[in-house]
């Protein structure tokens, strides 16, 4: 699950925002992203996830980092 989420979020990361067009920046608004997924101890089939995001689009001059935390159930039938 972690690999899938990491691959998904990387679709929104601009590898070179300093040289990208405005269109590319809008399509890839993150300068960096990382996903961490861990088992919830004592609660089989559930996971804690943390998304670390560093947006860059329309935030020129600001350095902002975000951390999103959620609890994920396992896929049914998995």
Image: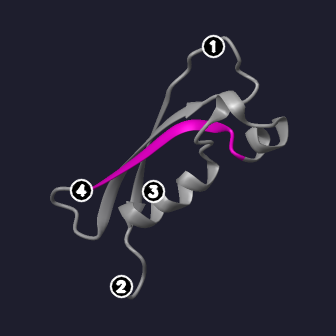
State how far apart marks 2 and 4 are (Cα).
Answer: 17 Å
Q: Position of residue 31 (x, y in %)?
A: 57, 34
- Magenta span covers which residues? 28-38
Q: Quadrant of the C terminus?
A: bottom left
Q: In terms of sequence position, does the residue under pointer 3 or pointer 4 come before the other?
A: 3
Residue 25's place in the image compared with 77, above or below, is: above
State how far apart marks 4 and 1 are (Cα).
Answer: 35 Å
Q: Secondary structure at mark 4?
A: loop
Q: Nearer the viewer, residue 5 or 18?
A: 18
Mark 3 or 4, closer to the camera: 3
Q: Secondary structure at mark 2?
A: loop
Residue named by callout 3: 6
Look at 61% across and 36% down and name the residue there. 16
**Per the image, is 41 magenta?**
no
Look at 68% across and 39% down and name the residue there. 29
Residue named by callout 4: 40
């Amino acid at each position: 699950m972690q690999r899938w989420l990491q691959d998904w979020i990387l679709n929104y990361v601009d590898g070179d925002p300093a040289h990208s067009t405005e269109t590319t920046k809008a399509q890839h608004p993150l300068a960096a992203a990382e996903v961490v997924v861990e088992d919830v101890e004592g609660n089989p089939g559930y996971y804690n996830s943390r998304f670390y995001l560093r947006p860059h689009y329309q935030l020129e001059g600001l350095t902002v980092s975000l951390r999103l935390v959620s609890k994920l159930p396992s896929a049914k039938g998995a």
